[in-house]
């Protein structure tokens, strides 16, 4: 799997190109990622992305740690995560973790005085494991939890759509939404940041909050697909959240619950792996702007093989006649504008997160 780490920082200080260049090991160059907020540190064999996350992603990462981290988390570690003011994501675009990548991560940790969330615990800049106790694997959600989470995602997507509508009409819809959530005991499913979105008065949400809530519609679509309620469109086609929400009985006055019948685990895994492959390729392209033989990479990548079935591939690069890369609406990535690629990246990411939650549990 693609290696991705999170660094929690106690201060919100911007990283400059000069600062990251000074931290980079000898023989590695640094450049700004043009379409993402961050940098690419690379050599011939390895390329590492250092991304600066926005406030919404920071809050989501805190919630993720609280639910899925070591149990119980030490009080001092919990305080460091909860009090973080900036979040960095470290992604390996090309190559494998090695001594140079560890050196870069160590320098980053020292520079921001942060701690890093790896797969096996939380570590400081000295390499000390701050969470040495066993990690308790979360359980996959049961039918009741799946239904409530679908209601939550539908509610958040609906709330985001009300922000710019006619005030008289949207006030009534928002009141109806809150009453329905209360009546059906859905408020308990909401994380703190999600509850604040639902409870915020109209006009109070900023752009990032509206955007983050609206993207959850894609997670709702993935869950509906996994439950056999819809056929999931391609990652470059948005779902219709209102129609999907109705399939779950969202805002219905009926007391009869819609039955949940999950698709076979193998089918769910293929879709989840497919969304992971799309997510990786789009993120990688936004940082490098280079065509690649995605078909060949999918077979040989150290974090693979990647699931490419049902994805549309096209010839990539002027001299790569036999090499196939991912396509968006039947066009190569080089022919697609960055805004569209970024939208497709968010779509694939939300679908992947939702399908991972269905099979592995934890926070979503």
Image: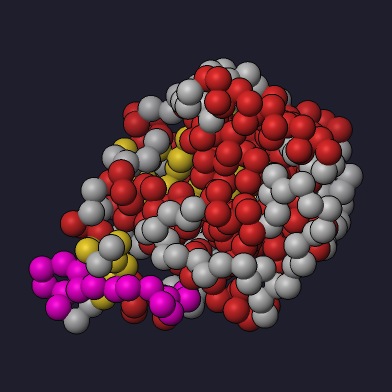
Q: In this figure, which colouring scheme has been used for the structure?
A: secondary structure
Magenta-drawn stretch contains 310: yes
Residue 247 against residue 39 in the figure, above or below: below
Q: Residue at x 65, y 41 (%)?
A: 155
- Horizontal side of 223 relative to 81 (left or right) equals left
Q: Position of residue 217 (x, y in %)?
A: 55, 49
The residue that appears at 87% across and 48% down in the rendered structure is: 71
Report the quarter where the N terminus lies: bottom right
Query: Residue pushed farthest left?
Result: 318
Looking at the image, which is closer to me, 134 or 163? 163
The correct choice, above or below, for 362 with respect to 200 in the image is below
Q: Determine which quarter of the picture holds residue 355.
A: bottom right
Residue drawn where x is 57% and y is 41% of the image:
157
Residue 24 makes an appearance in the image = yes
Q: Nearer the viewer, residue 130 or 3?
A: 3
- Left or right of residue 345, residue 331 in this image: left
Instruction: Give coordinates of residue 78: x percent, y percent.
Output: 79, 34
Q: Which residues are magenta?
A: 306-321
Residues 163 and 173: in front is 173
> Going by the image, does 231 lie left or right of 258?
left
- Quadrant assignment, res 257: bottom right
Total numbered circles: 0
x, y (%) of residue 247? 64, 59
Where residue 148 appears, as percent x and y from the top left, is 76, 51
Q: Confirm whether the magenta stretch covers residue 364.
A: no
Q: Is residue 112 visible?
A: no
Could you say which is closer to the camera, residue 40 or residue 284?
284
Q: Is 55 above or below relative to 71? A: above
Decide whether the magenta segment is chiefly helix, strand or loop. loop
């Amino acid at each position: 799997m693609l290696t991705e780490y999170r660094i929690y920082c106690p201060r919100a200080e911007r990283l400059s190109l000069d600062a990251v260049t000074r931290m980079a090991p000898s023989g590695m160059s640094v450049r700004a990622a043009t379409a993402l907020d961050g940098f690419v540190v690379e050599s011939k064999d390895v390329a590492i992305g250092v991304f600066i996350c926005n406030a919404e992603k920071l809050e989501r990462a805190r919630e993720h740690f609280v639910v899925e981290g070591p149990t119980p988390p030490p009080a001092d570690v919990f305080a460091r995560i909860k009090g973080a003011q900036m979040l960095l994501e470290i992604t390996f675009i090309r190559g494998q973790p090695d001594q140079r990548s560890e050196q870069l991560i160590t320098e980053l940790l020292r520079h921001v005085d942060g701690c890093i969330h790896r797969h096996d615990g939380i570590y400081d800049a000295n390499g000390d494991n701050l969470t040495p106790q066993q990690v308790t694997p979360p359980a996959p959600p049961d039918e009741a939890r799946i239904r409530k989470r679908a209601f939550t995602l539908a509610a958040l997507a609906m709330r985001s759509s009300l922000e710019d509508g006619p005030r008289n009409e949207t006030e009534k819809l928002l009141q109806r939404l809150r009453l329905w959530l209360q009546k059906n005991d859905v408020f308990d499913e909401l994380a703190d940041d999600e509850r604040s979105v639902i409870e915020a008065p109209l006009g109070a949400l900023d752009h990032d909050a509206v955007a983050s809530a609206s993207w959850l519609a894609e997670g709702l679509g993935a869950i509906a697909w996994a439950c056999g309620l819809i056929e999931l469109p391609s990652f470059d086609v948005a779902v219709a959240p209102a129609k999907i929400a109705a399939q779950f009985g969202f805002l219905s006055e009926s007391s009869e619950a819609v039955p949940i019948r999950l698709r076979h685990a193998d089918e769910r895994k293929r879709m989840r792996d497919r969304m992971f492959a799309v997510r990786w390729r789009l993120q990688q392209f936004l940082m490098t702007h280079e065509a690649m033989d995605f078909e060949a990479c999918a077979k040989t990548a150290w974090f693979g093989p990647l699931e490419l079935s049902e994805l549309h591939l096209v010839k990539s690069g002027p001299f790569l006649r036999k090499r196939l890369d991912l396509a968006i609406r039947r066009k190569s990535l080089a022919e697609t504008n960055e805004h569209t690629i970024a939208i497709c990246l968010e779509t694939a990411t939300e679908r992947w997160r939702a399908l991972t939650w269905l099979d592995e549990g934890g926070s979503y």
